[in-house]
Image: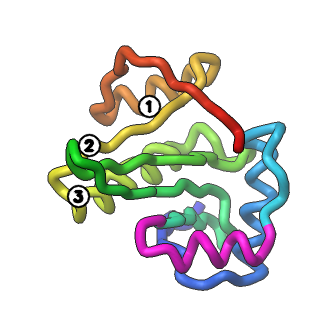
Amino acid sequence: MHEPIIFEATEANIEYLKSINMLLPQLSQSALPMTIEALNAIITSPDTHLLLLKADGKIVGMCTLAVYYAPTGSKAWIEDVVVDNSMRGKKLGRLLIEHAIEAARKYSPCTLMLTSRPARVAANALYQSVGFEPKTTNVYRLKV
């Protein structure tokens, strides 16, 4: 395997769109395919950073860093972390997370957060190994 490259998507193009749509079902069974318009909305938002991981000439992973400001301080979330099934076990997820952490430092001081289902044992171990601590809280969702 060639040295993996992580970069921020700065344009909405078909290569990125196809790669993201290949990864989405591996992230969530309920995820709908992304459109070029949705990809463009992410890329043009100054507070959203879509990080793509390329290995062996193709995009095999992604995550999103989203930043916002609240009265209690700057917050950032890492969302939609996924590495292609065929590339797992090669520490690529760790590279993505470490890259996102470094990108978040630009907004320091801030609180960087993420969520992960308990069933994702390897992912949870990874997050804790790079310094994330479990937070005792409830996460609620309301689709509007």
For the rendered model, the colour scheme is: rainbow
Q: Point out the stretch of residues depicted in magenta.
A: 35-48
Q: Image height check: is 45 above or below 67? A: below
Instruction: Bin the neighbour count of mark 3 within 10 Å (Cα to Cα): few under 14, some 14-19, many 20 and up.
Output: few
Q: Amino acid at mark 3?
A: Arg
Q: Measure the C-alpha gap from mark 1 to mark 2.
A: 18 Å
Residue 99 visible in image? no
Mark 3 or mark 1: name the one nearer the start of the chain. Answer: 3
Q: Amino acid at mark 1?
A: Leu
Reading the image, the residue beneath label 2 is 111
- Foreground: disc 3 or disc 2: 2
Across and down, in percent, residue 30 comes to 82, 39
Q: Is residue 128 above or below residue 108?
A: above
Residue 47 position in % (x across, y down): 42, 67
Q: Are marks 3 and 2 in contact (CB under 8 Å)?
A: no
In the figure, is residue 31 to the left or right of 51?
Answer: right
Q: Residues within 10 Å of mark 1 (few under 14, many from 20)?
A: some
Residue marked by disc 3: 105
